[in-house]
Image: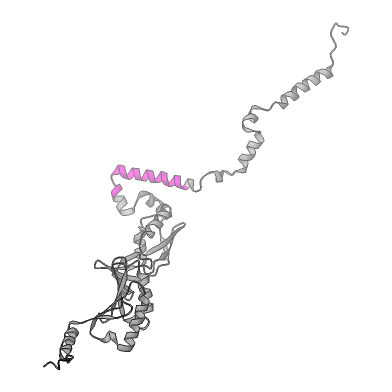
Amino acid sequence: MDGGGRYLQSMTAYQAGVVATRAASDRQPPRIKKVFGSSKSVRRRSAGVPIEKRIPRYLGTWLTLGFFSGVVTFGLWQGGHLDTFIRENGQPHHALARALGLGLEQVTISGIAQMRETEVLTAAGLNSKLSLVFLDVNTLRERLEHVPMIESATVRKLYPNELVITLTEREPYAIWQNNGELFIIAADGTVIDLMQDERFVDLPFVVGENANIRSKEYLALLEAAGPLKARIRAGTLVSGRRWTLKMDNGMDVRLPEQGAADALARLVKLENEQKILEKDVLAIDLRMADRVVVRLTEEAALARAESLKKKPMRGKGVET
């Protein structure tokens, strides 16, 4: 105690206690640390992702266009002019996009040889009342690939107002006659179109059910015919099993189901040695490997019958 009756207390000890209490308090993590981690780390993550990367691209443009489209559409609908506006200017959202400089002003088409540009535009459903920004390239591609002449398509947008279309066409391979109708077909048998164009008249000609998907067999037979290839006008698939060739003089050449190329080699030999294609014959049957059967024309058959009558009968003299 001091002279005034008060206890003496070490200031150093008191300060140490205070320090110890504060140190313990400092070791207790703040509530925000328990939930979110340190405030520094929170600020660091926010600063590491720029706001422009967290907002979808073109969000402002889409929202603006959507807002004004809604306003215009509502106004036209309220005024009873919506149908007239759509008929003259297209859908309101397309009209608004065109007014903002995002119209469909140029379409570049590449890869076409058989098709015309107008056919491509019609198939894709493109016209001047559309806008580039609201076109769906996947929908356009699917529309184009549904066209039989088109094997594949790619569609790209080039802002502000150009659309680029690249096509791969199916090559016309042959003409197919089925049920009295003529079709242009691709190499895989896909029907491309009705035969309505004289550009394709020189294509190989196949006839009969499923002859379109067997057309490669027919073209192989044409090559096997060698010098007679130019004289073959068409091939008919009979019962889905074998081919009958139609020659340029109307004669039919019936080939076997197996060994058709060998039968054609026999035909080439007969033509070289006997000019069989120049005779009055309706059909030549090569289905049997050891013989050739011919069917004469009616006139040739009558002439042959008359000649046989005039031949001497063995052991009975000559008929008069």
Q: Is residue 39 left or right of residue 280?
A: right
**Residue 303 in picture, x, y percent from top left:** 17, 87
Q: Is residue 214 left or right of residue 300?
A: right
- Can you say which quadrant of the picture contains the N terminus? top right
Instruction: Pick the residue in front: 302 or 158.
Output: 302
State the predominant SS element of the stretch in magenta: helix
x 34%, y 43%: residue:
74
Furthest residue toward right: 3
Furthest residue toward left: 320
**Residue 58 in picture, x, y percent from top left:** 49, 48
Furthest residue toward front: 315
Residue 9 drawn above or below residue 129 = above
**Residue 101 in picture, x, y percent from top left:** 43, 55
Q: How is the image coloured?
A: one colour
x 29%, y 66%: residue:
209
Instruction: Pick the residue in front: 175 or 272.
Output: 272
Residue 179 image-quadrant placement: bottom left
Q: Is residue 293 magenta?
A: no
Magenta highlight range: 61-83
Instruction: Pick the residue in front: 302 or 50.
Output: 302
Instruction: Pick the residue in front: 211 or 160.
Output: 211
- Can you say which quadrant of the picture contains the C terminus? bottom left
Residue 166 image-quadrant placement: bottom left
x 31%, y 50%: residue:
85
Residue 44 drawn above or below residue 273 = above
**Residue 141 in picture, x, y percent from top left:** 41, 57
